[in-house]
Each structure stands twice: as C-alpha cells, then as structure tokens.
C-alpha cells in the first residue's frame, strides 16, 4: 500500500527530479504536490471519527498529523519568506506546534485527542490554503529567494514523510483499542520477503559512517566520521515470527534472566507475553495489522517489538543486536536481503550525537538534537516509510519500551 503510492511520479516521492536544476520552481512544486498528496491518500480511508482519536500520549490523531505538517510550512516557510502571507487561523499555531519551544507556546501533546474543532473539513481547508500559498511562493521566487527557501521546502517535505508513517502507526494503535478490530485497508499485505538464518561477515577494521554528502539528510546523520569494527557476522534476513514463537514457547517472556531490569519491569507491569497487537484466539496467534486481524504468519518478519524485547530475544538466541555502525557498514556493503521496506531494526546503540555534532541555532535546530538522550537508534525503514525517505545513514529513534512502530529485529554474532 505505502509502496504503491510512492511512485506517483515514476520516481521516489519527495525526491525532486534531478534532471531539473536544484532551484527550479517546477522541480520543487512537483515534489511538494507529490508529498502533500501522499498524506491525503493515507488519510483518505479514515472517517472523521477515526481522524480525531488519540489512543495514547505518544500517538497523535490523523487530523493533527495533517494539520501539524501544514503548520510546519506555514511557520517556517510562509511566515518568514512569503511577503503578505495571511495566516489561515491564528489559533492554529498553538494547536499544531508539536515541540518547537522557539516557535511559541503549544497545546499539550496528551490532549491532542480532545480537539474536535477545527473539524476534519477545516483542516482540509487549512491544507489547501497553505498549499496554494507555498506554490505561489515557489513559483514567484527569484534566484536569491529560491536559494533561501529551497532548504526549508526540502526539510518540510521530509518532515511530512515522517508523519506519513506515524499516521499509519498511530491509527493502527487506535484500532487496536477497538474490540471490533477495524481494518485500515483490506488489500494491505506485508511485502513478501525471503527469510533464512544465514550470517555474513562484515569486514572488520576502520570504516566511515554518516551521511556522505549526496542528497538530503537530517543533521543527526552528520558529521561523517571513522569508526572501528571488530570481526562480526550479521544476519542477512530479519528475525521471523516463527523464531519469535520459539522464543515464546521456550518461556522467553517468563524468564527474568533474559531481560534488562527495565524491560522485565515493563513485561510485568503490562503483562507482555507476545509482540504488540498479538492476540491468542482459541489457542492460535493472531495479529492486528493494517489489513485487519490476521493469523500470525510464521514466515514473515516479526513486527511491533520493543527494544527490551529485541534485546531479550538476542540474549535468548545467544546473539546480539547490531550497533548502528555495524548496521550501516553492512548496509553499504550490500549484505542485507531486506534492509529497507519491511521493518525498522533496533540497534544496541543509544541515540547520541556523532562526534562534533552541533544542532543549528533557531527553532529548526530543535528538530533532532534535543532528543539525544534516553532513546535507542533504529535503522533501515519499514513498509510504511515513504519510498526515498530513508537511506543507509538514516537514524530513527524511539524509547526502549516503544512497540507501536513497525519495528523488528536483526542479529549479529561475534564468532
Ligand atoms: Fe513534526
């Protein structure tokens, strides 16, 4: 589903046509339209009622995602760069600012589900208003204005693509609270991938990781720097549900020695006995997916596991989670059968600044840097990640107990 949408223009959505000059208006308008349309396409199967719900503080309503991504363009592009721009509604900055302290006060995140107004229709009108103003700004920009606005349009598009994935993870979490197990899209299927328990060697020694300067990246992927890897082998394929069933059957969720202390506390507090959205019905495991409630497919990669579970599984298997450097070197060496497009992969690396990293001044400097504490890095991308959004240096990050993302597991072996 997500993958079909990704090639609306015959190339990756959000990636401007490189045959056009970098600062051509045509190139940016085309990319802008494609990304904005993809958000609407993902929201389209959802009713107004679906779009208001907030099932936990970490998840946001669909309507909020649609409005917040719009506010981002209004706040960071239109207000400073579009002379005479008229705000759609001056109250929206308070409602739809997420965490940008420098951009002013904001509504409390856990209360986003309380906002029945503006309505879904109002938010659609907000999007149309901002879309028209952005396109007008780009179309009328001279060379000097274009070089100032192109980087903001670009980060706005990558930001919106991040929310496109969150829109799906968040609505699945909301549907999982509903005893009728709603279906987002009955045609949805996890991409078919081959699976095997094969390990391949990563070349040891000095390597470079981080963004290499080609195309867009977020600031947290820089500076590129050297890192030393010892001898290690990494799984070509993701861990499967079949392996997870073996872990469960072997008492994985009932053996404290396998777990980090915080992880074991979470297992006990929340009664975890299987990955997120798994339910046992008449002795068989089912899982709520975007395609509805489905029998757990043993051959498919496991999804919706937390860092705690990934770590416990690795310990049980006598293996380890990869560091993010091991993952990136292996990805660049082409060692993975399924690096992208299935499941994000937990690494054992804490989300920390690379050597010499400094967040930019101003509100956009709040994008990544201030979250570099207490979270773990995930690498790769999932089936819900818009095509072209991720890359080998991409660093996703979540708190260790989080499991509502499309997160899976890859192992390493120090032989
Ligand atoms: Fe955001």
Image (cartoon, rainbow, N blue to C red):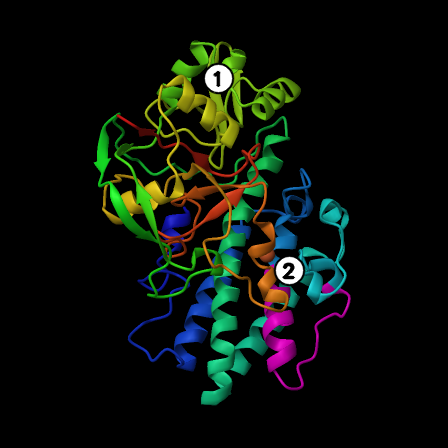
317 sits left or right of 128 in the view: left
Task: Place residue 318 in its image quadrant.
Answer: top left
- The answer to if 274 sits in the magenta stretch is no
- Residue 26, given in percent of the width and then of the height, sits at 40, 79
- Residue 238 visible in the current orientation: yes
Give the number of marks.
2
Viewer-side residue, 331 vs 164: 331
168 sits left or right of 205 in the view: right
Magenta residues, as a range?
69-93
As displayed, is residue 183 above or below residue 295? below
Task: Place residue 28 in its image quadrant.
Answer: bottom left
* Residue that appears at 64% across and 22% down: 270
- Residue 246, given in percent of the width and then of the height, sits at 39, 14
Viewer-side residue, 188 vs 415: 415
Viewer-side residue, 229 vs 398: 229
Q: Earlier in the sequence, mark 1 or mark 2?
A: 2
Mark 1–mark 2 distance (CA, rounded to whole Å):
43 Å
């Amino acid at each position: 589903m997500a993958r079909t949408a990704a090639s609306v223009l015959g190339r990756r959505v959000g990636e401007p046509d490189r045959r056009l000059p970098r600062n051509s208006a045509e190139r940016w308008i085309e990319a802008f339209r494609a990304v904005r349309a993809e958000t609407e396409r993902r929201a389209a199967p959802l009713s107004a009622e679906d779009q208001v719900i907030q099932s936990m503080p970490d998840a946001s309503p669909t309507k909020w995602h649609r409005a917040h991504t719009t506010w981002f363009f209004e706040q960071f592009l239109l207000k400073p760069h579009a002379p005479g721009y008229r705000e759609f509604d001056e109250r929206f900055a308070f409602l739809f600012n997420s965490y940008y302290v420098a951009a002013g006060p904001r509504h409390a995140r856990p209360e986003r589900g309380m906002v029945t107004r503006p309505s879904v229709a109002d938010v659609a009108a907000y999007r149309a208003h901002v879309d028209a103003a952005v396109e007008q700004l780009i179309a009328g920009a001279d060379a000097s204005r274009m070089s100032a606005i192109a980087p903001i349009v670009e980060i706005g598009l990558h930001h919106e693509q991040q929310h496109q994935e969150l829109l799906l993870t968040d609505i699945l979490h909301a549907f999982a609270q509903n005893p009728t197990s709603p279906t987002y899209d009955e045609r949805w299927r996890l991409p078919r991938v081959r699976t095997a328990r094969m390990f391949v060697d990563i070349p040891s020694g000095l390597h470079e990781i981080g963004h290499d300067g080609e195309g867009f990246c977020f600031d947290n992927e820089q500076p590129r720097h050297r890192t030393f890897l010892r001898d290690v082998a990494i799984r070509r394929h993701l861990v499967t549900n079949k392996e997870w069933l073996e872990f469960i059957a072997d008492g994985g969720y009932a053996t404290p020695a396998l777990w980090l202390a915080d992880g074991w506390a979470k297992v006990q507090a929340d009664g975890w006995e299987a990955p997120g959205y798994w339910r046992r019905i008449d002795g068989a495991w089912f899982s709520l997916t975007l395609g509805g409630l489905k029998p757990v497919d043993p051959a498919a990669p496991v999804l919706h596991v937390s860092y705690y579970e990934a770590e416990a599984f690795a310990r049980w298997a006598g293996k380890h989670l990869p560091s993010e450097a091991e993952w990136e070197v292996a990805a660049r060496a082409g060692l993975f059968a399924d690096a992208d497009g299935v499941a994000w992969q937990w690494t054992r690396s804490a989300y920390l600044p690379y050597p010499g990293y400094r967040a930019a001044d101003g509100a956009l400097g709040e994008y990544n840097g201030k979250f570099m504490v207490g979270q773990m890095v995930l690498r790769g991308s999932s089936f819900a990640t818009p095509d072209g959004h991720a890359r080998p240096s991409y660093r996703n990050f979540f708190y260790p107990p989080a499991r509502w993302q499309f997160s899976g597991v890859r192992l390493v072996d120090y032989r």
